[in-house]
Image (cartoon, helix red, strand yellow):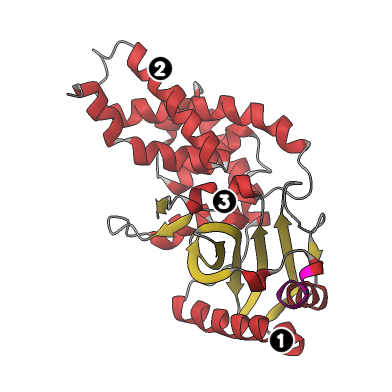
Amino acid sequence: MPGAEDETFEAHRDLMFAVAYRMLGTVADAEDAIQDAWLRWSAAPREDVTHPRAYLTKIITNTSLNRLRAVRARREAYIGPWLPEPLLTRENPDISERIEVAESVSLAMLVVLETLTPEERAVFVLREVFGFGYAEIGAALGRSEISARQLAHRAREHVQARRPRFEVDRSQQQEVTERFLDAAVGGDIERLIEVLAPDVTLTSDGGGKARAARRQVAGPVKVARLLRGLATNPKAGMDISELEPGRAEINGRPGLLFTRGGLAIVAMAWEVSGGLVTAIQIITNPDKLAAISSGRTLLI
């Protein structure tokens, strides 16, 4: 029979995973941070813990910070562009502000968060996504409330300058998605160019373990040609004609999942804004598709 401390920890596991995933960008690192948090929770005296949510948030924030500093060196040596590990997402009926929460977990936003310092990232996630007060954030980071406010201000300005554009209107997002998929599947490069924004980018992550473009591709013509090549020419990178395609919501965004034998081989998501596709992310690194293959989902 689990003890009360086990039940308390498990009751807050989803919150801790949500914080750790946004801090670290991969499921494996987030789960490792939760394991570290459990070791600290189980070993610490808890007689004076009156607010378990705040206490566990402090623990997961600090274990995530420690891991984030360690993985940054590893990511600097990554082969090709680095993208976060994708996850299938579904709506959490208990969250009313789903738009803001969904934005915070999009692949494009997680890439932006990678450019923050570890402390700025922690403050941004806790404040902007989960609504923690500055005093709580300061306590979690071992800083003063004033220092937490300053970190939040810097992080907010940095993110605002780089924030990906996205379509709030779900029906508009769906309409653009249909046009985009029709053109992409049909191989009609002219129609595909028409649905791509002038500054559209395509980022693919193979991690040196699967074929992918080693540099970000920019501009509607180049992006359209690359997408048509993937769909019609196996030598262009991968023969997706042999894979089973399926619609999916990936990190709160419309996407496609290509599978073989029930295993995810390619995950593709995109951002929509102003009636056009503004950014596309493609993940082929098999290490980053294990969670999706296992059916892991994230409530947003």
What amino acid is labelled 2 in the image?
Arg
According to the image, label 1 marks what residue? Answer: 194
According to the image, label 3 marks what residue? Answer: 289
Dominant secondary structure, magenta: helix
In primary-sequence order, the first of circles 2 and 1 is 2
Q: Residue at x 24, y 22 (%)?
A: 5
Foreground: 40 or 1?
1
* Separation of residues labelled 2 and 3 (CA atoms): 30 Å
Which type of secondary structure does the marked residue at label 2 adopt? helix
What amino acid is labelled 3 in the image?
Leu
User: Residue 112: horizontal and vertical position, in percent?
Assistant: 65, 50
Give the quarter of the figure containing the N terminus. top left
What amino acid is labelled 1 in the image?
Glu
According to the image, label 2 marks what residue? Answer: 40
Q: Residue furthest left?
A: 1
In primary-sequence order, the first of circles 2 and 3 is 2
Q: Which stretch is magenta?
A: 229-234
Q: Give the crowd class for mark 1: few <14, some 14-19, many >=20 residues within 10 Å.
A: some
User: Residue 168: horizontal and vertical position, in percent?
Assistant: 49, 71
Residue 89 vertical position relative to residue 76 in the rendered view, above or below:
below
